[in-house]
Amino acid sequence: MLSKKILLAYDGSEQARRALVFAAELATAAKAKIGVVSVVPVHAGRIGVDPWDDQKVHSEELLEARRQLIEVGITPQLHEPYGEVAEEIVRTATDGGYDHIVTGSRHLGLVERTLQGSVSGAVATRFPATVTIVH
């Protein structure tokens, strides 16, 4: 079954850019709608010094993704929730009626996965439909 509505999880990384290209090709082939989500992480008790925690950075990432998709003839819907990243990606997909999530993989090692968690792995585990992890 072809996807009808694809949600791209985008953080501006090289892996996310590859995921964007894949999602655009898939959306074009399937004549699917596409949305882009960039989650502003909320960490309890943590000072927001990580540049990826900044709402402005996430807004710029969404605009960058939109520009790239518009260049290939796709006008995406943009989503910028706050919260736990994997949980918000899944919630956005579920609430928005998406049937496919595309995300990149950061290729974390065991220690990094243990400390930071794997967003793509958590999304794949939690979302009840198709998830594509682009390497």
Image: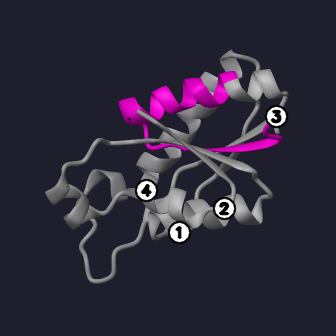
Q: Amino acid at mark 4?
A: Gly
56 to the left or right of 75: left
Q: Quadrant of the N terminus?
A: top right
Q: Marks 2 and 4: in contact by CB < 8 Å? A: no
Q: Secondary structure at mark 2?
A: helix
- Where does label 4 land, which residue? 121
Q: Secondary structure at mark 3?
A: loop
Which residue in the rendered view is the most extreme toward the top?
72
Q: Which of these two is toward me, 26 or 89?
A: 26
Q: Is residue 12 magenta?
A: yes
- From the viewer's perspective, is residue 1 above or below residue 38? above
**What's the CA distance linking mark 4 and mark 2?**
17 Å
Numbered disc 4: secondary structure: helix
Label at residue 32: 3
C-alpha gap between disc 3 and disc 1: 24 Å
Name the one closer to the observer, 103 or 132.
132
User: Nearest the camera: 49 or 19?
Assistant: 19
As drawn, the residue found furthest toward the bottom would be 45
Residue 104 placed where, x, y %? Answer: 45, 40
Mark 1 and mark 4 in contact? Answer it, CB < 8 Å. no
Residue 19: x percent and y percent? Answer: 52, 32
- State yes or no: discs 3 and 4 in contact (Cβ < 8 Å): no
How far apart are the alpha carbons under marks 2 and 3? 17 Å
Question: Residue 88's quadrant in the figure?
Answer: bottom right
For disc 2, the marked residue is 92
Q: Quadrant of residue 33?
A: top right
- Tell me if label 1 and label 2 are in contact, CB under 8 Å: no
